[in-house]
Image: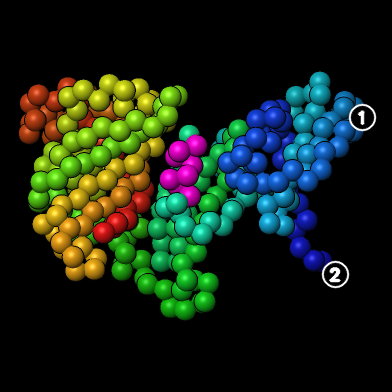
């Protein structure tokens, strides 16, 4: 009797921006456009159907009417749409390059990785990568195997920090990506596994983080054995950053590095060993 979810309706007051987002960023294809001279609100309405591998959304925009804004707090009823991705790391890198902010995550669980973004209207969109064990309904590892908070910094990461090496920190601003460097020996780890770095300059990075707090961080050390037994390993960290000029974490950095004008605190969303 019932076959499938046919489509999802999204009301927008920024139709062109929304079409561009779902097309240029998420890969939805324009399927059909309609113009309704008189909608249920008594005003004309534009309807746009867009398709992603059989998942259809219907964008609706009213002329001369102002629908109520989407609720900002948790509420009953529809919550969000979820899109499956093949590789969360590649998806996050792609979104970062597009200037799309990941507002939550990525967070890892035994069965997969989740993250959330927003469309131009503030509608949340979940991104989900399922691990093979979940797809095959095999026994997935327990939460305790990967760390209770879903991250659990590996011991090899701490081993890398015990050796000197170059740290690269990428942020994104209006003119694109910006890269700065620091040293492994400058990185401190808090009790709740956040990273603290002393700030001497980093003026452009600070401006970028005010508008988009998403950052990528890489570090490594040749003295630490990698995944294939070869010398050298490294990590890619995806997270959010904030600049601190007061408080306990700032004092921790200032005590070790008196020259620091501020502390950069990175909250880790996802960490991946790359070598």
Q: Which numbered disc, 2 or 1, marks the residue that appears first in the sequence?
A: 2
Spot occupied by residue 193 in the image (x, y as percentages of width and height): 24, 48
The residue to which callout 2 is attached is 1
Q: Are marks 2 and 1 in contact (CB under 8 Å)?
A: no
SS assignment at label 2: loop
Name the residue at 22% across, 47% down.
219
Let me know if residue 96 is in the magenta part.
yes
Let me know if residue 65 is in the magenta part.
no
In the rendered view, tell whether residue 4 sits above or below residue 177.
below
Report whether 73 appears left or right of 15: left
Q: CA distance from mark 2 to mark 1?
A: 32 Å
Segment colored magenta: 91-98
Query: Within 10 Å of the Cα at label 2, are there few (<14), some (14-19), or many (20+) other Cα atoms?
Result: few
Name the residue at 70% across, 46% down.
29
Residue 132 visible from this viewpoint: yes
* Residue 38, disc: 1
In the rendered view, tell whether residue 142 sits above or below residue 165.
below
Name the residue at 20% across, 50% down.
220
């Amino acid at each position: 009797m019932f076959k499938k979810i046919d489509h999802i309706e999204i009301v927008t007051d920024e139709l062109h921006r929304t079409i561009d987002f779902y097309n240029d960023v998420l890969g939805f294809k324009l399927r059909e456009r309609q113009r309704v001279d008189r909608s249920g609100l008594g005003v004309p309405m534009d309807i746009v159907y867009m398709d992603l591998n059989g998942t259809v959304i219907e964008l609706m925009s009213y002329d001369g009417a102002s629908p109520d804004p989407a609720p900002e707090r948790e509420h009953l009823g529809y919550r969000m749409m979820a899109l499956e991705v093949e590789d969360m790391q590649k998806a996050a890198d792609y979104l970062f390059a597009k200037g799309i902010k990941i507002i939550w995550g990525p967070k890892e669980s035994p069965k997969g990785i989740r993250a959330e973004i927003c469309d131009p209207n503030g509608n949340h969109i979940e991104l989900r990568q399922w691990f093979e064990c979940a797809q095959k309904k095999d026994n997935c590892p327990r939460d305790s195997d990967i760390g209770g908070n879903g991250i659990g910094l590996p011991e090899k990461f701490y081993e890398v920090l015990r050796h000197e090496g170059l740290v690269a920190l990428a942020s994104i601003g209006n003119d694109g990506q910006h890269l700065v460097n620091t040293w492994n020996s400058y990185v401190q780890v808090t009790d709740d596994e956040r990273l603290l770095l002393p700030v001497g300059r980093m003026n452009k990075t600070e401006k970028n983080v005010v508008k988009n707090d998403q950052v990528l961080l890489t570090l490594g050390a040749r003295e630490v054995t990698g995944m294939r037994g070869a010398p050298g390993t490294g990590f890619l960290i995806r997270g959010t950053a904030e600049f601190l000029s007061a408080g306990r974490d700032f004092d921790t950095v200032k005590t070790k590095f008196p020259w620091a004008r501020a502390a950069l605190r990175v909250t880790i969303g996802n960490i991946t060993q790359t070598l």
